[in-house]
Amino acid sequence: MALTSSPVRGPEFAERVLRAEEIVRKAEETDWDFEATPEIFAKESQADVIAKEIAIVHDGHRQTIIGNLVIAGIGSRFNLMGPVQPDSEFKIKPTSLLSDLARQLGEGDVTAFLNRTAYDKPVEVDFHNYTNFYTLRDLVFWHLVQGSGCFPTALEHMKRHFALGKVVQNNVYETPFVGRDRAKPVVMQARCMSVAHNTRVVEWMDKPLFGGLEQDTFHVEYLLTPGRSRLSHPYLTLADEARVEYGGIRWHVRKFTGATPKEGLRGPAIPPESGSS
Amino acid sequence: MQSHGCSPVELYVRGEIPRELEGCFIVAMNRRHKDRARFSRWHDSQADLLRMDVVPGSPGRVTATILEVDPSGADLGDRFVRSSFERAAFGANAAYGYATQPNHGVNVADQRIWATNLLFGAPLELDLQTWEPRRILRYVEPTPEAPRVSTTAHFAFSRDRSRAYFHQSLLCAETEGSPVRALSIKLVKLDLVSGAERAWELLPPQGDAALEPANFHSAFWWEENGHDYVGLLRTGAVLESLAPHVGAEEHAVIRMPASTIWFVRIDETVERLQAELLPGLESFHGFAMSHLDVSLPPGDGFVLYANCKQSDVAEETHGQNIYGQDPAALTEHYAGMVAEPFNYGCVIRYERTGGRHKVDVFERPYEAMRASEGHTWLPINVQVDASQQAVYCSFAGFRPRLLPQHVYAAYADIAVDPARVRYVPPLIMRLDAQTLKPQKVKGRGHITYAEPLAMTVIGDCESGYLCTFSPEQGLRVLHAGDMNRVTAYAVNHELWHWNDLHFRPDPPHMIHVSAA
């Protein structure tokens, strides 16, 4: 989601917080129907993950996802949200795992994908201002303070995650370059994200919601397990299998590649949900 | 191929599984190829029957066992007699298809499961405990001219569940200029106490005698003046051909007629039963009436809750979409994956007492501005809670890029405007059983979006549970009185795929069998 409002300080910021609080209270009273609070509507979401290269490391008790993301956006300041388990450990930590895996199982998938598209070479961005949203209220409030708003359908999806006892992890990222329009978005790459939680089973990541720019996501996904695994990705093609060493342990790795559609797609030239529709 | 039981899989449980869930859930799943370029009709896709055994507790335990069904019936040996035509046709004659491919509905009574296809083939009976197939319920004999069978997916049961009823017919292959039509329509009764069975020839009612749309997705039972009656939702799917497409090109679509309901009075003394049309639906224009639940008062009559999909359920996703986009350009375009609606559907409430009837209809488009009002896009499940106060309905929503242009063209005058419609998220909604309006109670969720479609309600709308399942999202247990509260969920993504080439999409239905 692009964060569109210009940053403010001092009393002006305090005013913005009060205004956001007022809108959120009203929205909550009306069961989050946007009719009563059309000011919640985002104008355009204007950012999408277009490619991801991730490794899911599962030792039988704990799952760690290490990922590089390529994101396209219109604007220069954005946020990225994702539901995670409440006991998750999120960090940005340099690791050579993805490049080591690529070296052994074939390099250049994401680069080749970007070369096939009209996207520019990505610029590096860093995630910062990590936040957790524990309620729908937190989430809407934060977006109002940042001046970006939300979409009703996306909010309903997030409501489900909160009901399951998940939290929504949120990061901000920005670039000195500005994506001007759909034909020329800014393309960014965020590296070495790591999120880990306890689980006895491998849990594939959720399909992302359509952010208005790129309808598909290109994936390179590695599954690392201590022993040979039969587990397959439901949509991606098994590209390779190997044994690798990581963290002093020998792992069985399965590599999956392919594209998946985002959730919530609409027809071409159909605008997003808005207060006037 | 033999029906094949896979090793049990343990799901990872978070939360507390209530004691009311002790028993098992049954789900008829299917599998699809990851390669989107392959056309494979949903009806024909391999049936994988799932039993999830549930041990209550915190966190409790959920163990899944899958039975991969042999669609030829050959694994049943002498418990299913195959004619020489069938032995030659299986795997060779696409118009014949299979003896059974139960990847859709699940019926249960007295430790027996009958799994069904949504349109084709005959029900497969399984033993709940051993999870092994017992027999195929077939009362018509396929021939080269009428090679396929059609059966009601969701059976009717008498009040005491001692009798089950369903329809079965042959399907005659299309001829030049004429689509597929039903032949030898039968109504079958299973006496679940004595084990006796009988079949009547079913004569179509006056005013709805066409045999092309004579297919019935669900049935229901009621009592009046000491007689048993059976109602059949005449869904009305019109098939251009019995065999699936060889290529996934656009083709002319024959528009299906509006749905209606046939009914018969059961008469054990005759060989033929004359069907009649349930009065009050003459001006009703719902398409693809499919699923139902029925509330039976202590005396005569019934209250029927049924849904219409406004979707041509004889067709499936393939070819160019309503925006003129080629399937190859759309990653989400699974050829033959699903039937998309051409407009929002409806839920009807039909009350019949003392020979009188009353019909109410609930229908809504999706308005993002008022998401709490819900919508009725592609209704799937209907279930009345134990108190008969609430009706829980699931709706699959709408993915506009999956509606084929050639299907849209047949319904353009009553279809949604492609330029104005967006994605509509799936949802489950609780309706008031009397008024058929959303049952809103301040502070207690009556609606849940993005939930799996397969659902079942255990108990009542105050203290009971709404359970949902998909291979992706797992088994989820929500409070039926407040659908914003989840009490437990259990997941294992091993259920989401089959080997490396296939995945299992969201199934439409599930049932719960109590251990009590």
Image (tube, grey):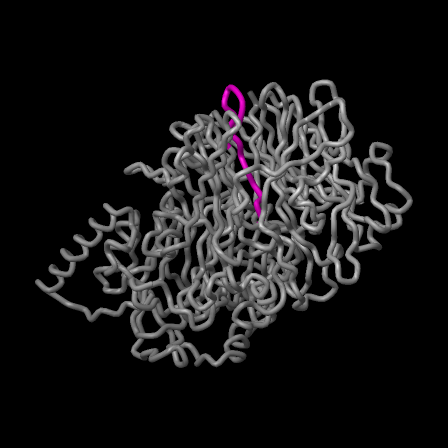
A121, above or below B147, in the image: below
Residue B325 drawn at (x, y percent):
55, 72
Q: Is residue B291 magenta?
A: yes
Q: Is residue A246 magenta?
A: no
Residue A104 drawn at (x, y percent):
59, 67
Please tell me which residue is depicted at 37% across the width and 66% down the height of the picture.
Answer: A272
Please tell me which residue is depicted at 51% across the width and 53% down the height of the picture.
Answer: A204
Report if residue B186 is visible in the image.
yes
In the rendered image, the quadrant that contains the C terminus of chain B is top right
Does residue B83 appear left or right of residue B116 in this picture? right
Residue ranking furthest to the left: A11
Report if residue B106 is visible in the image.
no
Does residue B1 appear left or right of residue B158 in this picture? right
B223, above or below A60, in the image: above
Does residue B98 appear left or right of residue A2 in this picture? right
Residue B504 drawn at (x, y percent):
61, 50
Q: In this orientation, which residue lies closer to the viewer: B236 or B56?
A: B236
Residue B176, quarter of picture? bottom right
Residue B206, quarter of picture? top right
Q: In this orientation, which residue lies closer to the viewer: B145 or B444?
A: B145
| Magenta stretch, residue numbers | B288-303
In the rendered image, the quadrant that contains the N terminus of chain B is top right
Residue ranking furthest to the right: B84
B184, above or below B172, in the image: above
Please tell me which residue is depicted at 69% across the width and 42% down the height of the picture.
Answer: B102
Please tell me which residue is depicted at 13% across the width and 63% down the height of the picture.
Answer: A13
Residue B497 drawn at (x, y percent):
62, 51
Instruction: Report how many numbered discs are placed on residues in the image.
Output: 0
